[in-house]
C-alpha cells in the first residue's frame, strides 16, 4: 500500500498549530480516516456482516512525546484536553466526552503491556462531528495509532487498534457501539467484515473502484443534531438483546432464522413489536452484504445498486432508524431521503447511512445527474450538505513528510 504523504503546506499548518498550543516543534505526524458504511446497517453489534470503506476525509495530528505522565490533545477549535495516565479507570463525569476516549484507549494499551507515556498532539479534522462519517472512530484510531507507534513499536495490528477504540467507546465513553466504524477507519480501503468471531473478525479487502461505474459516492448531511439521541441508538441493540434472551442467545446471528419466525407468536407476548421488526432487518441485511460484495467482485453494479436500495428500505421499514420516536416537527433524515428520491429520478441508489436518526444519507449518483443532484440537495439543506467522496486505501497511519 502506498504511503500517505503529508504535503509541506499541510505540515507547516500543523506545525504552527502545534507550536501555538505547546511551544516547540512536533516530531511525527499521524492520520486516521473517516468511514462510510456501504452495506450492513446496524449489523456489527449483532456479530453480522458489513461492507465499509475508509474515505478521503481524515483527522490528522502533529505529535511529540512530552516526557510526562499526561496526554495533552489540542483539537482545533476546542479546549485543551488533558488526561493523566495514573488514573486509567472509567470516570463517570467523562461519559460522552473526548477525555473518556483518550483514557479508554490508553487504558487498553496499558492492559496489553504497553508502557503508555505522555505526549502532546495538535489535531485538525475534516471528519466533522455529526457528519455521519464517524469522527469518534477516526479519533479513537488516531490516538491508538499514535500510542502504538510512539510507545509499543507498532506491535498492535490495525484490526486490534479498532478493537481498542471500541473498548474505549463502550467502557469509558458509554456508547454501546459495534466494531464496524473503528475497523473501517483503522484498516483502510474497501473491506467486508464478518463479526461472527468477535475477538477475531474476518476482514477481507474488496477490490473495486467506484469511480469506474459512472456514479459518484455522495454523503448528504441532513443537518440534524444527534447529540441527544444516544438513547435512540442504544435502544436498537438493547431491544435485540432482550429478544435474543428469549432464545437464550446473545445476538441475532446465533438464532436460526426459521426458529425466530416460528417463535413470533410467543415473542410478541414478551417483546415489543419493534424489536421483532428490527430482527427481521438483521436477517435480511446480513444476507444482502455478501450478495453486494459478490455483485461488486463480478462487476454487476446494477445488482449492487438494487440491493443498496433494498438496504435503505429495510432500515426505514424494519430497523426504523430514520425518525426518532415521537418526532413530528423535525424529521431531517426523512426529508434528506425524500430529496434523494426526487433528484435521482429513479436512477442510482440512496440509503440511511450509519447510525441513522440524524447524521447522513448515502447516495450513488450518476455523473450526468451529479450537478443537478448536488444543487437540489444544497438548496434544500444548505450549502455544502452534499459531499462527493472517494475510498481511501490507507487506514490509521503515520504519515511521511513530502520531500
Image: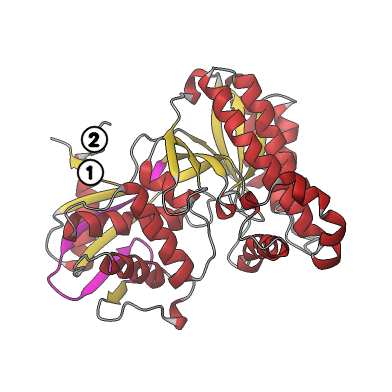
Where does label 1 land, which residue? 399
Residue at image point 46% right, 23% down: 209
Q: Is residue 308 above or below residue 256?
A: above
Is residue 325 placed above or below 1 in the rendered structure? below
Q: Whole-percent x and y of residue 399?
A: 22, 43
Horizontal and vertical percent for residue 156? 27, 53
> Is 58 colored magenta in this rendering?
yes
x and y, in percent, of residue 154 in the image: 21, 51
Q: Which numbered dot is residue 3?
A: 2
Q: Residue at x 70, y 28 (%)?
A: 344
Q: Residues within 10 Å of mark 1 (few under 14, many from 20)?
A: some
Q: Would residue 313 appear left or right of 25 to someone viewing this image?
A: right
Residue 64 counted in the magenta span: yes
Note whether residue 335 is visible.
Answer: no
Foreground pick, 149 / 62: 149
Q: Is residue 28 left or right of residue 253?
A: left
Q: Is residue 297 visible?
A: yes
Residue 374 found in image quarter: top right
Q: Residue at x 24, y 52 (%)?
A: 14
Mark 2 residue crowding within 10 angstroms, few (<14) / some (14–19) / many (20+): few
Secondary element at tag 1 = loop
Q: Which residues are magenta?
A: 56-80
Residue 290 image label:
none
Amino acid at each position: 500500500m502506498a504511503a500517505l504523504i503529508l504535503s509541506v503546506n499541510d505540515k507547516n499548518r500543523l506545525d504552527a498549530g502545534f507550536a501555538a498550543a505547546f511551544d516547540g516543534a512536533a516530531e511525527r505526524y499521524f492520520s486516521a480516516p473517516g468511514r462510510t458504511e456501504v452495506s450492513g446497517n446496524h449489523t456489527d453489534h449483532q456479530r453480522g456482516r458489513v461492507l465499509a470503506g475508509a474515505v478521503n476525509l481524515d483527522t490528522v495530528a502533529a505529535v511529540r512525546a512530552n516526557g510526562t505522565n499526561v496526554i495533552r490533545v489540542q483539537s482545533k477549535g476546542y479546549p485543551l484536553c488533558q488526561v493523566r495516565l495514573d488514573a486509567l479507570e472509567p470516570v463517570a463525569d467523562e461519559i460522552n466526552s473526548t477525555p473518556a476516549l483518550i483514557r479508554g484507549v490508553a487504558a487498553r494499551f496499558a492492559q496489553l503491556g504497553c508502557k503508555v507515556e505522555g505526549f502532546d498532539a495538535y489535531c485538525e479534522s475534516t471528519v466533522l462531528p455529526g457528519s455521519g462519517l464517524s469522527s469518534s472512530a477516526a479519533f479513537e484510531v488516531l490516538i491508538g495509532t499514535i500510542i502504538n507507534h510512539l510507545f509499543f513499536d507498532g506491535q498492535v495490528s490495525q484490526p486490534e487498534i479498532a478493537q481498542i477504540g471500541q473498548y474505549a467507546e463502550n467502557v469509558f465513553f458509554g456508547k454501546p457501539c459495534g466494531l464496524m466504524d473503528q475497523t473501517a477507519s483503522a484498516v483502510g480501503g474497501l473491506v467486508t467484515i464478518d463479526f461472527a468471531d468477535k475477538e477475531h473478525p474476518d476482514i477481507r479487502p474488496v477490490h473495486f473502484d467506484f469511480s469506474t461505474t459512472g456514479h459518484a459516492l455522495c454523503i448528504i448531511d441532513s443537518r440534524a443534531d444527534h447529540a441527544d439521541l444516544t438513547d435512540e441508538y442504544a435502544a436498537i441493540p438493547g431491544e435485540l438483546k432482550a429478544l435474543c434472551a428469549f432464545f437464550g442467545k446473545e445476538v441475532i446471528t446465533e438464532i436460526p432464522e426459521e426458529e425466530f419466525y416460528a417463535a413470533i407468536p410467543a415473542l410478541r407476548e414478551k417483546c415489543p413489536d419493534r424489536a421483532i421488526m428490527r430482527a427481521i432487518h438483521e436477517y435480511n441485511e446480513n444476507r444482502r452484504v455478501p450478495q453486494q460484495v459478490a455483485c461488486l467482485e463480478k462487476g454487476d453494479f446494477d445488482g449492487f445498486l438494487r440491493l443498496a436500495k433494498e438496504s435503505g428500505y429495510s432500515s426505514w421499514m424494519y430497523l426504523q432508524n430514520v425518525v426518532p420516536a415521537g418526532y413530528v416537527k423535525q424529521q431531517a433524515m426523512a426529508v434528506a431521503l425524500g430529496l434523494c428520491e426526487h433528484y435521482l429520478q429513479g436512477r442510482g441508489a440512496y440509503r440511511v447511512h450509519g447510525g441513522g436518526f440524524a447524521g447522513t444519507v448515502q447516495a450513488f449518483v450518476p455523473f450526468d445527474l451529479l450537478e443537478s443532484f448536488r444543487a437540489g440537495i444544497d438548496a434544500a439543506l444548505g450549502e455544502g450538505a452534499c459531499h462527493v467522496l472517494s475510498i481511501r486505501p490507507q487506514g490509521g497511519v503515520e504519515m511521511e513528510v513530502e520531500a
